[in-house]
Image (tube, rainbow, N blue to C red):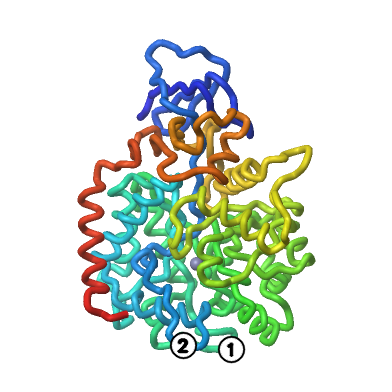
Amino acid sequence: MSGARYWAAEAWLDGRWQREVLLEVGADGHWSRITAGVPLPEGAVQLEGPVLPSLVDAHSHAFQRAFAGLAERRDSESDDFWSWRDRMYGVALRITPEQLKSIGAQLYLELLRGGYTQVCEFHYLQHREDGTAYEDELAMAWALAEAAEQVGMGLTLLPVLYAHAGFQQPALRPDQRRFATDADWIWNARSRLNAAGRPLLNAGVALHSLRAAHGDDIRRLQALVGDTDLPIHIHISEQQQEVRDCLAATGQRPMQWLCNELRPDARWQLVHATHSTPAEIEQVAASGAGIVICPGTEANLGDGLCDLPGWLKAGVPISLGSDSHVTRDWVEELRWLEYGQRLGLQRRNVASAPGARPSSAERLFEAALAGSAAPAGFSAWGLRVGARADFLVLDPQASGQLGVPVTHRLDALIFGGQGQVLRQVFVAGHCRLEQGRHAAQARVSADFDVVMQTLWGGSGE
Ligand code: ZN
């Protein structure tokens, strides 16, 4: 709400809990002033719980929400990422723009409930079921834009360059026909999306992966992007097979090849970056690029564990992605991120930095917060002047928070929480979620239910 003034008894400001914080929203829906140590002024709205910045969900494939919970059975000796992908294509090949809008609205509402207020949509489902272009080539992208608008979620659309079935493949597989794009298509899509003038919508660009976008495709897109400040996302090193194929095709590992051949910079977001060497981490750190970790999906797909201590030590910007949407809540993602490391390394508090930041929860949250702006192409994010006025109000009565000292609030939220923990969620100064409920919820859920029944009813899958 432009001109609104909010006041919180406690807010997470500049990396710590501060008391009596006045938060002022400018006419553009961004923070105009934030001041700690101010008694409740007349006319300010008193918030009924501690205030936390929201996070950006830096990696989403909205259509995969229609698949969550429907790929958890094994019918053959082995089941891995690649067999999952073939089944996922089965869903991708039958979703219409109208269905995608309903799926997206349900997902984005759930992401708001999960504490995200901006989502980066890695969007490659572009064409009709038979692979021909829609009358408006961006029909599927507009469906996502309308879904986000319906629930009041910020959206960064990333049309994806997708041109090859593998490192040595000249073209796509028949079941990838809905994804086919080239650099000029992506550039045109991104330009139209950015020119649409829709509030809360912006666009960047993406490359599916090094196996699906080859050096020449990427260089052409880089030339079009030039020195504009657009975010550039790419899936990289998610699977060992991809690393082996890259080594066979180029003699280098994926991140090594990317850094040596394409000179990524701070605009680049390397999604997953699961399988790395210390030398690759050094190269990525020197480039300024960020990584997007998707702990829930990486666990679900059996991808492997990233070298979290290595990335943190190198100071590489980190953001979170909900990716396939088996989890839609950053609290759960951060818990998974730390627990995966504990299980793998047989240690506790892997993310913490003794002395500087002994709390694992605080260090992970601060990393994800600091890493939030770049994937969305924003210059600022969080509780700081100039950033969009997005924030979360924690429920101080949530069972995991009862009696917990302020100093341990984030620890209790991430490692001891249960159920609904947010009282309100704000986007651009507007309250979108009140006690976990959204004004459009009944309609959105009913539409989604119908779409799911149409997609899955009687399919026997
Ligand atoms: Zn992905």
Can you give x and y, in whole percent of width and height, for residue 13 in the image? 58, 30
Mark 2 element type: loop
Is residue 168 left or right of 159 when viewed as pictured?
right
Can you give x and y, in whole percent of width and height, for residue 110 in the image? 37, 51
Which residue is labeled 2 in the image? 76
Residue at 30 percent of width and 61 percent of height? 103
In the image, 108 versus 288, the foreground residue is: 108
Can you give x and y, in whole percent of width and height, for residue 212 in the image? 53, 78
Residue at 66 percent of width and 45 percent of height? 360
Can you give x and y, in whole percent of width and height, for residue 160 in the image? 46, 68
User: Image quarter for residue 100?
Assistant: bottom left
In the image, 274 versus 183, the foreground residue is: 274
User: Image quarter for residue 235?
Assistant: bottom right
Can residue 426 be seen at all in this image of the molecule? Answer: no
Where 263 sits versus 407, above or below?
below
Which of the labelled discs sits on residue 168, or is there none? Answer: 1
**Which mark lies nearer to you, 2 or 1?**
2
Residue at 57 percent of width and 16 percent of height? 37
In the image, 389 versus 6, the foreground residue is: 6
Q: Amino acid at mark 1?
A: Gln
Can residue 107 be seen at all in this image of the molecule? Answer: yes
Which of the labelled discs sits on residue 69, or is there none? Answer: none
Where 291 sits versus 402, above or below?
below
Mark 1 element type: loop
Q: Are marks 2 and 1 in contact (CB under 8 Å)?
A: no
Q: Amino acid at mark 2?
A: Ser
Q: Earlier in the sequence, mark 2 or mark 1?
A: 2
